[in-house]
Image (cartoon, rainbow, N blue to C red):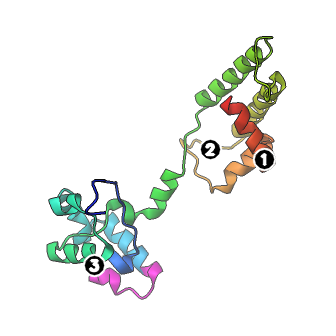
């Protein structure tokens, strides 16, 4: 990759065992203990390597080339700086953020309005899509309304956001009758 004309964005993912330079963290007996100690040091700003990260991230050597894990560790030891980004310290929340989405009441209401418009258009004699009928859009709108109802029944207890495990969305979809068996059809209707 270093000899390529491409300049991709790259994230190096590795465990604390591979990338951490903090001797106290590395001396912890288990991975769980290392993770807990690392998080505690970062939170309290007591890791000399992590707090120096901001100065290192704009170094030409870091920006200019793609390094493997061994090169990163060597570079970090030479500079006495961290070899991982802020996000690799918090990989779990980065993954959650990457796989999350915001579904606001306004967005869902717009979807329902669009489904209604599609019902009206597909009911016209000039509508010439053979595989899709007005009935398909009526079904889609009903699903969206059930989905909205399922969401409205969720207790928020004055929270601004709700974080649930991934399976939760499937439970909501099921309440709206959106299932694996009909997902392909639903997507085809949506894409029309």
Comparing marks 2 and 3, which lies closer to the viewer?
Answer: 3
CA neighbours of label 2 inside 10 A, class few (<14), some (14 to 19), many (20+): few
Tell me if mark 1 has few (under 14), some (14-19) or many (20+) residues whose alpha carbon lies within 10 angstroms of its own. Answer: some
* Residue linked to disc 1: 179
Residue 8 located within the stretch drawn in magenta? no
* Residue at (63, 24) in percent of width and height: 110
Marks 2 & 1, CB-CB < 8 Å contact:
no
List the residue tagged with mark 2.
157
Q: Residue at x 27, y 65 (%)?
A: 45
Q: CA distance from mark 2 to mark 3?
A: 41 Å
Q: Which residue is mark 3?
A: 22
For numbered disc 1, what is the local secondary structure?
loop
In this view, 52 is above or below 139: below
Magenta residues (range): 21-33
Q: CA distance from mark 1 to mark 3?
A: 48 Å
- Picture quadrant where residue 11 is located: bottom left
């Amino acid at each position: 990759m270093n000899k390529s004309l491409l300049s991709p964005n790259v994230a190096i993912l590795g465990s604390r065992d591979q990338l951490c330079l903090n001797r106290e963290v590395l001396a912890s007996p288990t991975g769980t203990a290392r993770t807990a100690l690392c998080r505690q040091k970062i939170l309290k700003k007591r890791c000399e390597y992590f707090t120096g990260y901001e100065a290192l991230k704009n170094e030409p050597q870091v920006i200019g080339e793609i390094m493997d894990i061994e090169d990163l560790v060597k570079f970090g030891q030479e500079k006495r700086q961290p070899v991982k980004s802020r996000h690799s310290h918090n990989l779990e929340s980065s993954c959650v953020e990457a796989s999350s989405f915001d579904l606001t009441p306004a967005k869902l209401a717009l979807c329902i309005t669009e489904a209604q418009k599609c019902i009206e258009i597909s009911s016209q004699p000039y509508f010439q899509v053979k595989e899709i009928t007005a009935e398909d859009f009526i079904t889609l709108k009903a699903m969206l309304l059930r989905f909205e109802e399922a969401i409205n029944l969720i207790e928020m207890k004055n929270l601004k956001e709700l974080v649930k495990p991934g399976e939760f969305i499937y439970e909501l979809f099921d309440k709206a009758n959106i299932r694996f068996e009909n997902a392909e059809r639903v997507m085809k209707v949506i894409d029309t």
